Amino acid sequence: MRIRALREEANILQADLAKHLGVSQATLSNWERGEYQPDTETLKRIADYFDVSLDYLLGRSDVRRPGEVAAASSGVPYEDLPPEVLEKVEAYKRFLLEEYRKSKNE
């Protein structure tokens, strides 16, 4: 599990992340050391907090976000795409981010 690495990368104190998640610092420390596992709902909250996929959080994938899988697997570098396609890709990304934000606020 990559909780510690993500927390340190984001320069977040263990106490601050624990408070955000509504758990004790000792509990978070146990998760980071691999002594215990968070429940499914907490894993989802952690993944959302760091904007990564559950597979990335759990160490099952090196792709941080699901959208990166499609880009990585297409075999076509973004810079080789025509401008009109790049604009459509960017518009779709903005749409998805807005939908995601809306769903988090419901």
Image (cartoon, helix red, strand yellow):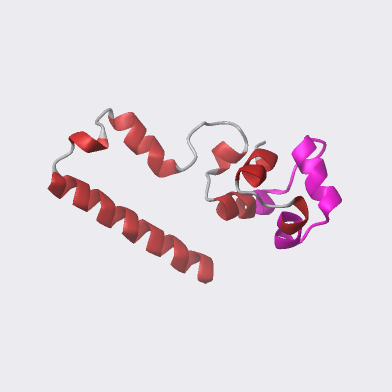
Q: Nearer the viewer, residue 6 or 41?
A: 6
Residue drawn at point x = 52 percent, y = 50 percent: 51
Residue drawn at point x = 78 percent, y = 55 percent: 15
Residue 87 sits above or below residue 80 on the image: below
Please provide percent x and percent y for residue 67. Answer: 39, 43
Highlighted range, magenta: 17-43
Residue drawn at point x = 48 percent, y = 65 percent: 103
- The single residue placed furthest to the front in the displayed view is 11
For residue 82, side relative to residue 7 (left or right): left
Q: Give the overall secondary structure of the magenta segment.
A: helix
Is 28 within the magenta?
A: yes
- The single residue placed furthest to the right in the displayed view is 26
Please provide percent x and percent y for residue 82. Answer: 13, 41
Residue 59 sits above or below residue 46 on the image: above
For residue 78, side relative to residue 51 (left or right): left
Q: Which image quadrant is residue 70 in?
A: top left
Is 12 within the magenta?
A: no
Residue drawn at point x = 61 percent, y = 51 percent: 44
Please provide percent x and percent y for residue 39. Answer: 72, 48
